[in-house]
Image (cartoon, rainbow, N blue to C red):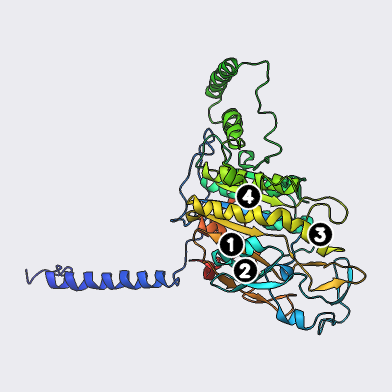
């Protein structure tokens, strides 16, 4: 080394190795912090980029997913948790007594009376010994597969706003459904069926109707397509007077004209999206007819679901909707929303809104729901679809542990109720959170619908805090500014 050199010393080998080792120490420390979740995470928006000419093309998730698709079974009308999945021995012990500390308890429809025990017996199910009621024995028999969230809460005690929240995250109208967010983020694994299909109850639509599958401010191409086994997608059938050959030639000619028109208007994303929708409709003429054709389903499959039940035609129709849900999932539809219960004014006409005669009403509804829904889960598992499908069984809120004064039914209760999940990435035979000793309020590990949505998106490989859409000056997201992944549910 030159003794007259006055600049910085040259880096010898020993110094280089010493300094390099310090850098490795920093890298290792950073890695440990990341594993413990102690690093500040990047929460910048991750708005998916999609080609408007191919809006349903598959897109990568934010991270490795546990599930590829979602099935939501939505029991509209607010199913009573204390009569189905949330066993409360204290409710049995104090039957027909006032609820302690409640005073003059006034809820949605007025004053409440005394506590009323479950109207059906609870029994231990499976190896887990989970207590579920005899109202839904087929579903109860699958308790070892399910992860129950007994501490769910909702923001509204009114059906329409609460349905909105369960499907969109917001009680107000005008927000996209979770299925639309999923389609926007991930596209579809099927290029001839919609990414998001809603299957209304055979008796009609839920109370908030198309809000449950509306795209709102997201591009319209991501809106859910609603049809069921009774009513296929309208306006897709080929007119009888038009031959198949002429129909195909007409579609090809229209495609040629559309492509010429698009070429004259480069960069017009609205036009491109509209043409893509027309293309999807053309493809669905064949695909939707095939997916709704049950002629190749075996007699054993129809019997498993109860689709051959001639004594209960409503059950048979719902069973066919369940088969339709399975057929859509196995053909690559990303998100399927299956409804049980339809809105109509009056008591006992089509949903789980048991205000006055809950025993009679629920006995009828359970006959429609139980066997077909349980068969759907069994069939998905037998076909290997549950390995990468997450199923969420939800309702908009719960019901009171008391009867309404002067009636034989339970009023609305958004303060604590039960939903459950099963399938990809979810613990089986597990219960999370709890309501109080009567099933009135969530008191342990209280969960929100925001948390449920965050968890479903997480299972699909999506960060709910980063999946956004810029609208009216706001980075909108499904979970608004709330929500945490319920990590204890994850397998």
Q: Which mark is residue 421?
A: 1
Is residue 417 shown left or right of residue 361? left
Q: Which mark is residue 149?
A: 2
- Name the residue tied to disc 3: 361
Which numbered mark, 3 or 1, is in the foreground of this view?
Answer: 3
- Residue at 75%, 52% (x, y): give it: 341
- Residue at 62%, 64% (x, y): give it: 420
SS at mark 4 in the image: helix
Q: Earlier in the sequence, mark 4 or mark 1?
A: 4
Residue 170 in view (yes/no): no
SS at mark 2 in the image: strand
Q: Earlier in the sequence, mark 3 or mark 4?
A: 4
Marks 1 and 2: in contact by CB < 8 Å? yes
Q: In which image quadrant can residue 434 be found?
A: bottom right
Is residue 83 shown left or right of residue 454? right
Q: Position of residue 38 (x, y in %)?
A: 45, 72
Q: Position of residue 438 (x, y in %)?
A: 74, 78
Q: Which mark is residue 404?
A: none
- Residue at 81%, 64% (x, y): give it: 359
Q: CA distance from mark 2 to mark 1?
A: 8 Å
């Amino acid at each position: 080394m030159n003794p007259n050199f006055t600049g910085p010393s040259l880096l010898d080998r020993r110094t280089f190795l010493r300094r390099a080792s310090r850098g490795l120490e920093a890298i290792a420390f950073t890695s440990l912090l990341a594993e413990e979740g102690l690093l500040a995470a990047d929460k910048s928006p991750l708005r998916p980029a999609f080609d408007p000419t191919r809006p349903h093309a598959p897109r990568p998730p934010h991270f490795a997913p546990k599930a590829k698709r979602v099935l939501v079974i939505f029991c509209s009308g607010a199913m009573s948790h204390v009569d189905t999945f949330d066993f409360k021995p204290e409710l049995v012990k104090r039957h027909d007594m006032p609820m302690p500390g409640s005073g003059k308890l006034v809820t949605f429809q007025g004053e409440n009376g005394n506590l009323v025990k479950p109207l059906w017996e609870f029994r231990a199910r499976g190896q887990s010994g989970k207590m579920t009621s005899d109202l839904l024995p087929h579903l109860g028999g699958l308790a070892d597969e399910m992860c129950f969230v007994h501490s769910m809460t909702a923001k509204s005690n009114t059906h329409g706003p609460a349905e909105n929240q369960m499907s969109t995250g917001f009680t107000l109208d005008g927000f996209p459904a979770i299925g639309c967010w999923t389609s926007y983020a991930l596209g579809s694994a099927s290029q001839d069926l919609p990414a998001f299909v809603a299957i209304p109850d055979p008796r009609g639509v839920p109370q908030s109707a198309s809000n449950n599958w509306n795209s709102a401010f997201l591009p319209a191409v991501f809106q859910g397509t609603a049809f069921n086994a009774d009513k296929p997608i309208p306006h897709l059938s080929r007119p009888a007077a038009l031959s198949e050959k002429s129909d195909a030639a007409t579609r090809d000619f229209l495609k040629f004209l559309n492509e010429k028109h698009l070429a004259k208007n480069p960069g017009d994303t609205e036009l491109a999206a509209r043409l893509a929708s027309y293309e999807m409709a053309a493809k669905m003429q064949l695909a939707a007819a095939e997916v709704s054709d049950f002629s190749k389903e075996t007699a054993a499959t129809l019997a498993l679901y109860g689709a051959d039940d001639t004594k209960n035609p409503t059950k048979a129709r719902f069973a066919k909707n369940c088969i339709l849900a399975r057929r859509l999932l196995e053909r690559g539809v990303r998100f399927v929303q299956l409804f049980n219960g339809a809105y109509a004014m009056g008591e006992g006409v089509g949903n789980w809104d048991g205000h006055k005669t809950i025993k009679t009403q629920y006995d009828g509804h359970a006959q429609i729901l139980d066997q077909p829904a349980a068969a759907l889960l069994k069939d998905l598992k037998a076909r290997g679809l549950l390995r990468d499908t997450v199923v969420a069984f939800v309702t908009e809120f719960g019901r009171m542990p008391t009867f309404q004064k002067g009636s034989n039914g339970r009023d609305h209760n958004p303060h604590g109720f039960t939903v459950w999940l099963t399938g990809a990435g979810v613990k089986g035979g597990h219960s999370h959170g709890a309501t109080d000793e009567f099933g009135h309020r969530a008191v342990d590990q209280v969960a929100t619908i925001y948390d449920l949505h965050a968890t479903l998106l997480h299972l699909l490989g999506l960060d709910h805090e980063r999946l956004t859409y810029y609208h009216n000056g706001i980075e909108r997201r499904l979970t608004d500014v709330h929500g945490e992944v319920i990590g204890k549910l994850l397998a």
